[in-house]
Image (spheres, grey):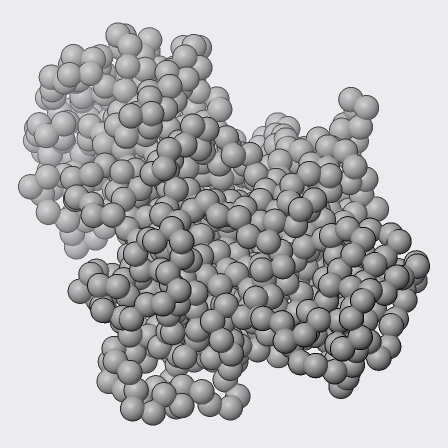
Amino acid sequence: MKYLGLIAVLFLMIISSCSKRTNFQADFDNINDRIWVGKDFWSVPLEEWRVIDGRLECNGEVEESRVNILTHLLSPDDGDFKISAKMGLLKKSGSPGSAGFLLGVYDEEDPSAKAACYFGKSIKAGASLKGFAFLNGQQVALPEGFDWGEFVISVKGNNNLLSMVVVDSKGNSTEKLTSKIDGIQGLVAIANNVTLEKEGKPGKSGFWFDDLKLSGSKVVLKQDNAFGPILWTTYTLNKNVVKLMAQMPPLGENDNQEVKLQLQKEGVWTTMATKGIEPDSRTAIFKIVNWDNTQDTPFRILYTEKGRDGSQARNYYEGTIRRDPVDKPLKVAGLTCQFYSSFPYSPLVENLRKVNPDFLYFSGDQIYESNGGYRIIREPVELSIVNYLGKYYMFGWAFGDLMRDRPTVCTPDDHDVYHGNLWGESGKHLSAKNVNDDLGGFRQSVQMVNVVNRTQCGNLPDPYDPTPIGDGMSVWYTGITYGRVSFAVVSDRIFKSGPEMVSNWQGRKDHLTAPLKDPSQLIKPGLKMLGDRQIKFLEDWITDWEGADMKVLLTQTVFAGVATHHGSLLGYVYGDLDSGGWPKNGRDRAIRIMRKGFVFQIAGDQHVASLVQYGVDDYRDAGWCFCTPAISVGYQRWFLPDELGREVSGRPGHGEPNTGDYEDAFGNKNFVYAIGNPDKQSKWDKRYFQAHKRSSGFGVCTFNKDDRTIKIDSWKFLAHVDNPNENDQFPGWPVTISQMDNYGRKAVAYLPEIRVNKPNQLIQVIDGQGELVYVVRINGNSFHPKVFKKGNYSVIIGEDGFIRKLKNVSTGSGGSIAVEL
């Protein structure tokens, strides 16, 4: 398959770029005390490791906690190598632990260092507090009176044979331990509490490590594997304002706390600003106004790393702030839900690179609690923040090269703040001891949630209303205009009411397993979805068309119940209150506003792709929403109304099953045009094939301003985007709709045709009670306004001081009206 060919090419690229054979050593003496070890290393989990007084220490809470050497690895070629390190016991738990090396850390499916750090298999070598040394399944007893305070492990090897000795500070040595092997390649890591077959749990002892040395003809340099100290950047360009954020690792108090933004103009780099690193989020944010958005501008972030001896090393991270693509179709990639089983998502990332979108939207769940293969930490606050950062850094490591040179919008969702489901209730505090995810409020501290908000949204334009909610929780809802498309970025979780306000049934409060005897109990006064503040923002936003031809709403989830089965095909759910279909009053209010601006919606969260046209009073009387595939599906969902025997009408022309007009559990009338249900998979499938079959992938929406169309692609995880076949997209895609389809309500009458001497004017239609019916930028010089009841209307044409207002325009007058601006 082409996918296998891609992996082979990636492997050859990795090996061919490792041309320089070199030795590696690290004594940590010149590193300030801190959590982040350095750009040549990656620790898993992040919070377990610290450089303290010139050596590396591990607290020993997580099994097989490790620090991978990124930049020096073992080549598959013939040759030899030697690795050694000093080690010593810091703390001994009731369950004896171990310390040692992971050798040849390599993922057969994906040869990248990123994959190896989390999924690589390895040969294990070390010493156990149970009294033995181990190498690739072989064991030898430690000498009597072995000094655990300080010892050295040395391993030598080649592609055929490994040998190891362990010597303590008194010179006591094990017998030489040897093991035959059939080749070795990949990363090398130091490891704490190594997992050994037949030995049970590996214990929770903590060790220190120092004087790490790796040498030999098999050792090759791969400097591109380095990660940090500038981990990645994100930016947005909103008209002529740039917001750019640099994400940094957890540095120490004695490290440099500033970064610089430099721009390249006429070949010369100029420092534009210097910003301090915010201590909780480890970010630095730059804002530049009066930006020249007509040309690509290279930028770089400069961070000067300072050693304990006063030495300095400059580090740069480069990217490009692209020009505003006002003169071509705008290609927006929609991505959501990054379960780590498919990390680093290499086939999908490569497909994104080929598609070359102008704009990236990550709609939520950039992390899951299990990402990285280790626990979450809820408290104390500082530890919970570093725990979050370690998981979130996986996202930036996977997508950073794409984000460095195109605008990116990233919005947190429930799992990002350690919730299975989130009903934020405007920042209400929910005790961290509460184990239920179907109660309203935030379990995590405000400080931790604010770190999530800043790391993911710090590059967004300033919030519409920055007033904090709850006990000081930040907000990020805002607007962006780019490529003559106006985006509204909102949260459908933060202000949402909790299901306990309506539920009186047994079991989960957010799941309906059968219809209620009285469905009206789900529609109570005061229930919120987007909240009053965001509703006000949307009402203002739909009337602001400065520099825009089309409008798009970016949310976390679809405003409909488009999933019938959760978790497994046995997990039937009649209605899910965690969907955007509830509360219905809040959902309908938002959709009524959206359709007044002919707004298209991009969402995520559901783990099953869908394309839905909303209905409020009737099917298809509102706008369209594309719920994109998940980048990597963990928890599966399906939409299978046909298999449930539900009567269907309005099946689309493509005839695909489980499509058509369906009313969900909350009474919402949804036209499901396309659905991307999972395929059957086998537990023996490799990681990336599992992702493909579990309906993982990404979406692309192309907004053509010339003909006002929206082309919607829904790509599968292993698609061949450069040479696609009919199976590379989910059934029913691609599809193209008109901007005007986003107000699907049928006309009752028409006003006279409006003819304008200047093209592409803004037109507002207002009814006799002064209420806005809709507002849209017309395409060309004429427009025939539809209305939904007969009578007199006002029509406002133009903007920016060039405005004509027509009063008492009647539905019965016919003909046309010429307007001069």
Relative vertical location of residue 76 with respect to residue 281 in this rendering, above or below: above
* Residue at 73%, 39% in the rendered image: 327
User: Does residue 773 appear left or right of residue 128 in this picture?
Assistant: right
* Residue at 78%, 71% in the rendered image: 814
Q: Nearer the viewer, residue 800 or 420?
A: 800
User: Does residue 257 appear left or right of residue 238 in this picture?
Assistant: left
Relative vertical location of residue 725 with respect to residue 608 in this rendering, above or below: above
* Residue at 41%, 79% in the rendered image: 667
In the rendered image, residue 199, in percent from the top left (x then y), is placed at 9, 43
In the rendered image, residue 725, in percent from the top left (x then y), is placed at 37, 33
Q: Quadrant of residue 234 in the image?
A: top right
User: Does residue 102 appear left or right of residue 363 in this picture?
Assistant: left
* Residue at 6%, 41% in the rendered image: 198
In the picture, the quarter occupied by the C terminus is bottom right
The reply to whether residue 496 is visible in this rendering is: no
Q: Quadrant of residue 546 in the image?
A: bottom right
Q: Nearer the viewer, residue 638 or 345?
A: 638
Q: Nearer the viewer, residue 254 or 453?
A: 453
In the rendered image, residue 747, in percent from the top left (x then y), is placed at 62, 72
User: Does residue 375 appear left or right of residue 296 in this picture?
Assistant: left
